[in-house]
Image: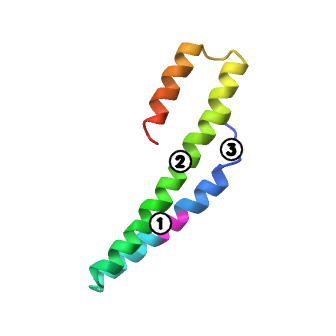
Amino acid sequence: MSIHASHPDIIKRLKRAHGHLASVITMLEQERSCLDVAQQLQAVESAVGNAKKILVHDHIDHCLEHVVRDGIQSMDDTIREFKAITKYL
């Protein structure tokens, strides 16, 4: 399996989310304000959501397009896969 061009960006985003999540845990342990914790949780959610969106779009743009163009997968199977992955957007 080849690495997609978008994977390094996704990894960077997920590492950022990981750092934000570690900060949330520390903040809770230090009994920081709920407003500060909520702000950090929003950063985690946003980073993960953006990474997911990039992954789904990349799969549609490259993987699904490739299997249809090269006749590797039937159009019906590709449409089913498209519907399945877009549920995550």
Q: What stretch is highlighted in magenta?
A: 15-19
Residue 86 picture location, percent across and down: 48, 35
- Magenta part, dominant SS: helix
Q: What element carries label 2?
A: helix
Q: What element carries label 1?
A: helix
Q: Name the residue under label 1.
A: 18
Q: Which of marks 2 and 1 is in front?
A: 2
For marks 2 and 3, give the CA distance.
17 Å
Residue 10 picture location, percent across and down: 59, 54
Q: Is the residue under label 1 in contact with that under label 2 (CB below 8 Å)?
A: no
Closer to the chain start, of discs 2 and 1, is 1
For the residue marked with disc 1, what is the amino acid?
His
Q: Is the residue under label 1 in contact with that under label 3 (CB below 8 Å)?
A: no
For the residue marked with disc 3, what is the amino acid?
Ile
- As displayed, is residue 62 above or below residue 72? below
Q: Name the residue under label 2.
A: 53
For marks 2 and 1, give the CA distance.
17 Å
Residue 29 picture location, percent across and down: 29, 81
- Taking the magenta stretch, the answer to whether it contains residue 18 is yes
Q: Name the residue under label 3.
A: 3
Would residue 60 appear left or right of 19 to someone viewing this image? right
- As displayed, is residue 51 above or below residue 30? above
| Residue 26 sits in quarter | bottom left
Asked whether 6 or 35 is in front, the reply is 35
Which residue is painted at 66% across and 22% down in the image? Answer: 67
